Image: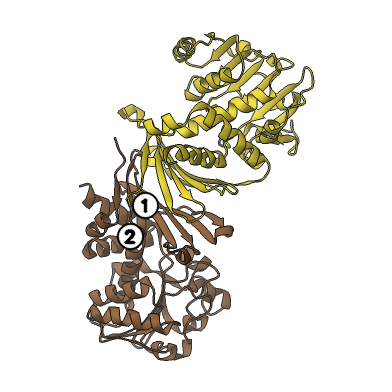
Chain colours: A yellow, B brown
Amino acid sequence: MTLPVFGLPAVEEAATTPLVLDTVRDALIAHAEGRTSVPPPLHMAFPEADGDCHVKAGRVAGAPDFTVKIATGFYRNPARGLPANHGLVCVISARTGRIRALLDDHGLLTALRTAAAGALVTHALARPGAATLAVFGTGEQARLQALWLAGLRPLDTVLVHGRDARRAAALCDELRARGLPARPAPADQAATADIVITTTPATAPVLDAARVREGAQVTGIGTDMPHKNELPPDLFRRAALIATDDHDQCLDHGDFGHAVRAGTAAPDADTAAGLLLASPVDRPEGAITVADLTGVGALDAALASAVLGRLMP
Amino acid sequence: MTLPVFGLPAVEEAATTPLVLDTVRDALIAHAEGRTSVPPPLHMAFPEADGDCHVKAGRVAGAPDFTVKIATGFYRNPARGLPANHGLVCVISARTGRIRALLDDHGLLTALRTAAAGALVTHALARPGAATLAVFGTGEQARLQALWLAGLRPLDTVLVHGRDARRAAALCDELRARGLPARPAPADQAATADIVITTTPATAPVLDAARVREGAQVTGIGTDMPHKNELPPDLFRRAALIATDDHDQCLDHGDFGHAVRAGTAAPDADTAAGLLLASPVDRPEGAITVADLTGVGALDAALASAVLGRLMP
């Protein structure tokens, strides 16, 4: 029996927006309720090639499958005309250990689950009438966060802040082509939007906490390693509600952890993001709310399993 | 570009005995000389299905590839007519992070590298004239250790000790069909052979240290978890030379570690097995020598890379 390998076009077709949203919502709730397992990842470094490899596994309790996801980043590749990132998702039966299939998805499912988690949590926390969005960053997640949030609520303005003006303009062009009223903006203006989403690899805060307006929702999705930091610790002091996708991860290597270490948030000040998706959020009028999303391995498992269910019904 | 997947027949044909021996010898030497990297493995447990999943990675410094090996064991499968173990080796470029190919080898390369490492180290440590072999255990490694050692030196007797007499007899039939003079033996007789190799999943010593003869070589390859134990701690007290394939692993979850904790060996009493392959062993007359092999992830990397070199020249 040959091992089935599904490439990017097949995965792209199977991973419809409703499927991704439903699966990610359910998995975030399962994770918040302690119904997932995510072992410590495996890591290798290749300093001579400026590369690294992470292997992450995850499972939702009771699910028929679990996944092992291999992801590499070799940062000199682009100079040679090669993509920096490669990867593979291996879907394995949690009942027999048999490898059911491989998804050679070039990282698509990781990008989609990150986009869906960001949009779902941001939408759940933002004021019902919030309609101006600012995204910090000009990469794939900047684009996806804007598009996916626009699928959940109407946006009348999208401000894009990037260090590279040409890339910011290009992203605005792309978002306008998709029907979103996007324009570049300086950081101080972007920080005043109703909804702010940061998607950068920054190692120091990208916005000024004092600029954030009362009633705003700020979501950070770029901080996934201890040396990274997007959201200013002072913002957490102003927040009436702090949502984390995984308490331990966010404490260890998210923006929430930076705030706790800076003394602007208590280590138990956060609420599991999944719980905010399970029932309506009681949002104080004029409150600032913050979400710190570091990426949850169990979401990979849930999404890959759901996609494989479409590919091999 | 489709990801190449090579199945068992292709891997079996490419993994010739000389290729496996040369590659494993070189990799054991590289490991002894500190020229490998092996990160801590990733582990998941599935208690409700009596299953587990281990992901191991490894690399030989300077090699063009590294590997990520996924292995599952679901121990209720055999009752349902399914194999207990499944797995996959992913060969990845150490220069670009690109996944070069997958080897869907059903664990063959792991079995072959274990057999080759056992035979090479046992052969290097045993007296030149040692010609009686006893194997404890009746599984795949019992068979392979006998066959691979017989490929390196003449054996005039092969004693097989197994708890299950029927399985021991069946293994002897199989070895005789391959030209080896094999017969079942009780544990106390098997322990007196010139060369003893233990290949069991035992959790308590399988032989009496007092029965082991002067001049004997004893190799343990079955102890790969802290709760397992094949070789009696007292045997290490009698040993003039103790070889380990990986000092830290053997101390943590090998028979050597049991001996150190029992006070019959000093924690620094061992010699890296690879060093004994790099130059001739100076073996005191009448000495007992012991090898504790727990399995080195870098060997997987080296062997998979070598096999892929044959499959995709």
- Packing grade of label 2 (10 A; few <14, some 14-19, many >=20) is many
Q: Answer with left or right where residue B6 lies relative to residue A231.
A: left
How far across and how far down the image is residue A71, in percent?
A: 44, 40
Q: Is residue A268 above or below residue A40?
A: above
Residue shown at 54% from the left, 28% from the top: A18
Q: Is residue B310 above or below residue A271?
A: below
As drawn, the label of residue B89 is 1
Residue shown at 44% from the left, 82% from the top: B164
The mark that comes first in sequence, 1 or 2, is: 1
Q: Is residue B231 above or below residue B84?
A: below
Q: Chain of mark 2?
A: B
Which residue, as the protein is rendered here, is positioned at the far right?
A284
How far across and how far down the image is residue B132, in percent?
A: 30, 86
> In the image shown, does B261 or B79 lie closer to the viewer?
B79
User: Is disc 2 placed on a helix, strand or loop?
Assistant: helix
Q: Answer with left or right where residue B40 lies relative to residue B128.
A: right
Q: Quadrant of the N terminus of chain B?
A: top left
Whether label 1 touches label 2, CB < 8 Å = yes
Mark 2 — residue? B109
